[in-house]
């Protein structure tokens, strides 16, 4: 895949922040590593700055994982509505260009309410993943006329459409992805052995990835990569396509070394290699 439009040769006269600031609203006391995985994924995918707003345990893990990250610890064990005003102030202060919401937040009722409140107030491109998807599937929610990218796996896609399940075949996955894109007026990146990216009209597939990427955390990294690309002002469909490609290809390279022992964090060292050299592994359905 040609990534040169997303990562063009840099001019000499550039400055910090020009290539995007990503705000990561992820993690909880239970899922304490999710914010770190998403934020480091964003940095490795080229974001100038990754800012983490998370409960203290998750924020501290992020800070210790990569000292480059900017962290704002929040009180409590999980996200609640009392945190939203602070998160919005941080977003304004840091002039963020995109947000990653949902990874590892947990599905506590106060968290679900907080996510809904946050999503309706943000004004920058967003990636909504994991528990963020659960929050918006629990009722009607406006995405504030700002298209988002939703990154479900098949089970989460079923929730978004208020279904018990969706058949795991290409035709059923494609139809359901388009329905979700239409329902939420968003781009959907359905994760799977073949990723489907659709806005309800146009559809792109991505074939990178490996069966070793069933490990927890690979989706968090994908969300971070996508947040970094959106922060550069890239079209939502193309950003989702590129992020899926990069994440999957990095997983392929990592699994060649690690096999069954692959951990999600092993992808970090291979993301730069993928960005610097792409292959044609994707196709357009139309």
Image (spheres, rainbow, N blue to C red):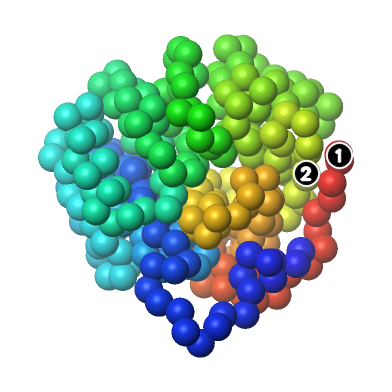
* Residue plotted at (69% across, 71% down): 4
Residue situated furthest left in the rendering: 75
Check disc 2: other Cα within 10 Å, few if <14, some if 14-19, many if 20+.
some
Judge from the rendering whether residue 140 lies leftward or rightward of residue 104; answer left or right.
right
Residue topped by disc 1: 286
Frontmost residue, 94 versus 219: 94
Q: Which mark is residue 244?
A: none
| Residue 217 in view of the camera | no
Q: Position of residue 123 (x, y in %)?
A: 41, 39
Q: Position of residue 52 (x, y in %)?
A: 30, 53
> How much space separates mark 2 and mark 1, taking CA atoms?
7 Å
Frontmost residue, 262 versus 137: 137
Residue topped by disc 2: 204
Indicate the secondary structure of the residue bearing disc 1: loop
Q: Quadrant of residue 253?
A: bottom right
Indicate the secondary structure of the residue bearing disc 2: strand
Q: Are the two marked residues, 2 and 1, in contact with CB atoms closer than 8 angstroms?
A: no
Q: Is residue 231 above or below residue 219?
A: below
Check disc 1: other Cα within 10 Å, few if <14, some if 14-19, many if 20+.
few
Quarter of the C terminus within the rendering:
top right
Q: Is residue 34 above or below residue 156?
A: below
Frontmost residue, 48 versus 207: 48
* Residue plotted at (39% across, 27% down): 120
| Residue 154 in view of the camera | yes
Q: Quadrant of residue 274?
A: bottom right
Judge from the rendering whether residue 9 lies leftward or rightward of residue 196; answer left or right.
left
Q: Earlier in the sequence, mark 2 or mark 1?
A: 2
Q: Position of residue 259 (x, y in %)?
A: 62, 62
Residue situated furthest bottom in the rendering: 12
* Residue plotted at (24% across, 53% down): 93
């Amino acid at each position: 895949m040609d990534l040169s439009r997303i990562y063009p040769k840099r001019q000499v006269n550039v400055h910090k922040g020009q290539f995007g600031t990503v705000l990561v609203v992820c993690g909880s006391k239970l899922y304490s590593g999710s914010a770190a995985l998403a934020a480091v994924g964003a940095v490795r995918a080229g974001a100038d700055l990754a800012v983490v707003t998370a409960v203290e345990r998750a924020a501290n893990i992020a800070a210790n994982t990569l000292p480059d990250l900017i962290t704002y610890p929040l009180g409590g064990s999980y996200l609640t509505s009392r945190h939203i005003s602070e998160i919005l102030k941080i977003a304004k202060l840091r002039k963020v260009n995109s947000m990653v919401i949902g990874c590892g937040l947990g599905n506590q009722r106060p968290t679900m309410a907080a996510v809904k409140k946050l999503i309706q107030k943000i004004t920058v491109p967003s990636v909504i993943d994991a528990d963020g998807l659960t929050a918006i599937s629990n009722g009607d929610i406006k995405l504030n006329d700002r298209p988002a990218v939703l990154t479900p796996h098949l089970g989460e896609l079923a929730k978004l459409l208020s279904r018990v399940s969706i058949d795991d075949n290409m035709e059923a996955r494609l139809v359901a992805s388009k329905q979700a894109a239409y329902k939420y007026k968003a781009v959907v990146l359905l994760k799977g052995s073949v990723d489907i990216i659709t806005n309800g009209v146009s559809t792109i597939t991505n074939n990178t990835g490996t069966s070793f990427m069933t490990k927890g955390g690979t989706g968090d990294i994908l969300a971070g990569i996508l947040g970094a690309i959106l922060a550069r002002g890239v079209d939502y469909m193309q950003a989702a396509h590129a992020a899926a490609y990069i994440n999957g290809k990095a997983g392929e390279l990592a699994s060649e070394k690690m096999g069954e022992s692959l951990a999600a964090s092993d992808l970090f060292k291979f993301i730069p290699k993928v960005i610097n050299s792409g292959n044609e592994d994707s196709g357009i359905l139309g």
